[in-house]
Structures are given as structure tokens and as C-alpha cells.
Amino acid sequence: MRLLLMSDTHLPKRAKALPARLIAELAHSDVVFHAGDWVDAATLDLLETHSRRLIGVYGNNDGPDLRARLPEVAYAELGGLCFGAVHETGPAQGREARCAARFPDLDVLVFGHSHIPWDTTAPSGLRLLNPGSPTDRRRQPHCTYMTATVTDGDLRDVELHRLPVR
């Protein structure tokens, strides 16, 4: 099962559209995660239309229209692993312990908010993944997103993809 992970698209404020390379990934992905800060409902509509399965949450910049359609936290069982998605996890310091305590039944937590890619594993075994942002790099050198696969109950091939500067 192939996963596509993104967050913090902030459309149309930070970019006019999702990058073509990211859109092309939709056709190759079984499950798409979006960890909040969509800003416009058109991006949600696009991903709902072009994804086999979409798991999304709202972020702090998402208004009432998106909050009415998306949860604050989403959960899914995928290929024998328990996944969760949330926008904010708080400061980097102490993140692993804080998330492991908050989400004790998860194997993988996809999150956003900081626009800073993150891939760590808590002592509990919880894998924390932040794909960064495909449209707003903030203080990062590149806009980014992630892909991964789930095979036989294992998360594999987690890859951070850098997008060319617009």
C-alpha cells in the first residue's frame, strides 16, 4: 500500500495550486494524508476527487467550512498498522513523549503545522512523520512532501521529497 503525506498547503495564499509533481503522485497512491492548514475547500475537493482514500484533518488556519468537513484528529487502520493524523503536536522538545502519551494505541502519527519535515520514533515505538509543506517552505530550503509504503504490517520506504523552487 503506497501512502502520500502532505500538510500545510495554505492555498491559495502561499501558492496558487498544488505542485504538478504532487498531483501526479495521487495516481500512484492508495492513501493520501493531509495534516491540516488547507485554507481553501477547493484543495479538499480536489484531493477527495482524485484520491483513492483521503485521510485529512483541519488545522489552525482552516475556517468553519473545512472544520465542518474534517475532524481535528483522524484515525485509520492500514495494512495492520494504526495511523493517526493531527495538525499540531506542540514544540519539538518533548514531542515524542507527549505524542506517545496522547496517542498510546497508534503505530504512526502524521502531523503538520511547523512546515519542518520530521521523522522520529518515540521510545514507545510510535513513528512521528511531518511531511513539511509542498507550497510554503518557510525557513526550510525546500518545499516537501513524503511517501511511504505499508507492507505486511510494517511502514517502509519513508521518503522525503524535495520540490523545485517555484
Image: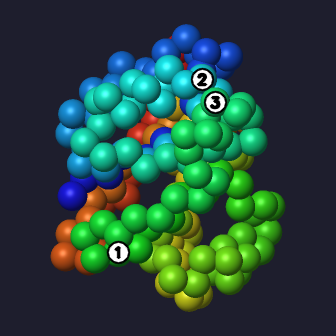
Q: Which mark is residue 65?
A: 3
Camera-side residue: 95 or 59? 59
Query: Mark 1 packing: few (<14 Cα in 10 Å), some, or many (20+)?
Result: some
* Image point (51%, 83%), residue name: 105
Q: Quadrant of the N terminus?
A: bottom left
Q: Which mark is residue 40?
A: 2
* Image point (31%, 46%), residue name: 53
The residue that mark 1 highlights is: 81
- Could you give the CA–CA distance between mark 1 and mark 3, rounded to whole angstroms? 31 Å
Q: Which mark is first along the chain, 2 or 3? A: 2
Q: Are marks 1 and 2 in contact (CB under 8 Å)?
A: no
- Could you give the CA–CA distance between mark 3 and mark 2, rounded to whole angstroms? 9 Å
Q: Nearer the viewer, mark 3 or mark 2?
A: 3
Q: Are marks 3 and 2 in contact (CB under 8 Å)?
A: no
Query: Picture coordinates of residue 18 (x, y %)?
Result: 46, 22
* Image point (67%, 77%), residue name: 102
